[in-house]
Image (cartoon, grey):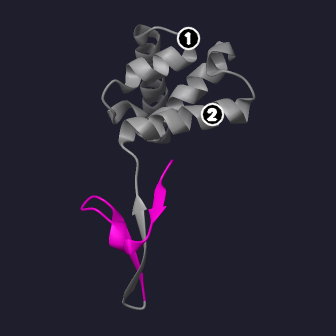
Amino acid sequence: MGAELLVPAQAEADDVVLAWEGEDVLAVRLPQLSESLDHILAAMERRHGMPLAELDRKAKQEAVRLLEARGAFSVRHGVETVAGALGVSRFTVYNYLNRETALSREKAAKVE
């Protein structure tokens, strides 16, 4: 996710300081959410072995589902960022999201 490890003395207010047996031993600086999204997209490209824009429609839909589960769309401009990485329009990303919501509702209705 792009976190940075620091000595506890370098920790700032937003950093997470880890303690062991009552003593601060490590600080972790988490990236801004928008930076995390870039790391997630890069990791997905590495896993697929190609740019996300070259994936077929089904694989792009799966990528959107995974990104939604990771909170990618709670980030400011998340939809735009993902759309650019997938080589699709924002409208298409919203369609993929709506499709997943509809499928989830169908599955829930079948369980009842």
Lower position in the chain sequence, tag 1 or tag 2:
2
User: Which region is colored magenta?
Assistant: 1-20
Res 95 → quadrant: top left
Residue beneath label 1, please? 87
Q: Residue at position x 71%, y 36% from top? A: 47
Q: CA distance from mark 1 to mark 2?
A: 14 Å
Q: Is residue 74 above or below residue 50?
A: below
Residue 99 x %, y %: 47, 20
Q: Which residue is mark 2?
A: 44
Please tell me whether mark 1 sits on a helix, a strand or a loop.
loop
Give x and y (percent) for residue 17.
36, 71
Q: Is residue 101 visible?
A: yes
Q: Nearer the viewer, residue 107 or 38?
A: 38
The location of residue 112, given as percent across then percent down, is 43, 41
Residue nearer the viewer, 99 or 1 = 1
Determine the residue positioned at 34% across, 33% down. 75
Please say if 95 is above or below 13. above
Q: What residue appears at the point 46 percent right and 35 percent down from the top-left corner?
A: 37
Residue 87 magenta-highlighted: no
Q: Is residue 1 left or right of residue 28?
A: right
Instruction: Classify residue 12 as left or right of residue 60.
Output: left
Front position in the image: 106 or 20: 20
Q: Residue at x 63, y 34 (%)?
A: 44
